[in-house]
Image (spheres, helix red, strand yellow):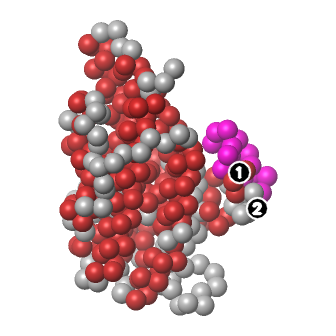
Amino acid sequence: MRRLAARYALLLLALPLTGHSTRRWGERGHIMAAQAAVDALPSEMPGFFRAARPQLAYLNPEPDRWRGGREQEADRALGEAGAPEHFIDLELLPPSRRAQILAARDRHDYADSLRALGERVQTVGVLPFATLELAQRLRIGFRQWRGARSAQERRHIEARILNDAGILGHYVTDAANPAHTTIHFNGWKGPNPNGYATDSRFHSRFESGFVQAAIRYDDIRSLVPRAARVFPDLRTAILAHIAESHARVEPMYAQDKATPFGVDQTSPAAKAFAAERLAAGSRMLRDLWWTAWVTSADP
């Protein structure tokens, strides 16, 4: 529970003065990642989906808005219950059993596996399952859209598709940030022979301050090629996306040690690192959307 409380303390520190939205990748980072994903979609994607660029971009930060700030205590508690969906601390899963645990049938069996280890979902996180559930739901939505019996029914289904696709974008973009895959989510924990940053502002210095100041849409879009992938297996692709991001945890801290992330940072290397991670989220999101559409035609 202390780790969960620490994550929410971080969120409160990141709240803008003007209201409800949090600044994780900054709203700016989440929105730009979604825009780049839409703009890289194949032309064969349904027109209603490609035309919904503003809506899909708006929805990308939405799960951070659910967490509450000014609501009553009971409402905040309900919002905070979704915190584990935003991260997974892979170091807490024994390497010899990690693949087996992450192959759980669903998040409930996964939670049972964690309890057997003496861990809890609230501590380890459930990001892969939150992402997989939404990707599967999106594919079902597209399948229903293909078989709609009337124009009105199709419009209702389109609303569901866009909501699921937009929310999916948040978790995919979160996973592209190495800090969402590690116990070192907000400063290096434990033995620290390389002298990496331990300050409790690390997460917001990178996701919010630096991205807000240094990254622009073109920095991301230029790194998202037009060629879209169709994943043969959603879970395998999602876990690979998270593993790729996790491999960059120490390089992220090494970059911060060389040129600390922050609003005044102008290092080209730091900018390239952040842009590449946001672009990785965009590429993955575009490919999950495209996979859901293409495979929805399968029997």
Question: At numbered mark 1, what does the secondary structure look like: helix, strand or loop?
Answer: helix
The residue that label 2 is drawn on is 96
Residue 34 place in picture, x, y as percent: 30, 50
Which label is found at residue 47?
A: none
- Quadrant of the image for the N terminus? bottom right
Residue sitting at 31 percent across and 56 percent down? 224
Label 2 neighbourhood size at 10 Å, few (<14), some (14-19), many (20+)?
few
Q: Which residue is mark 1?
A: 101
Q: Which residues are magenta?
A: 101-118
Question: Per the image, is 114 magenta?
Answer: yes
Residue occupying image coordinates x 74% and y 45% = 112
Question: Is 87 placed left or right of 285 in the picture?
Answer: right
Q: Most extreme residue toward the right, as rendered?
A: 116
Task: Tell me where residue 89 sits by quadrant.
Answer: bottom right
Q: Is 49 a magenta residue?
A: no
Predominant SS along the magenta part: helix
Residue type at tag 1 = Ile
272 to the left or right of 76 = left
Label 2 element class:
loop
Q: Give 8 or 58, whichever is nearer the viewer.
A: 58
Q: Is residue 184 above or below residue 67?
A: below
Under mark 2, the amino acid is Ser
Rendered image quadrant of residue 223: bottom left
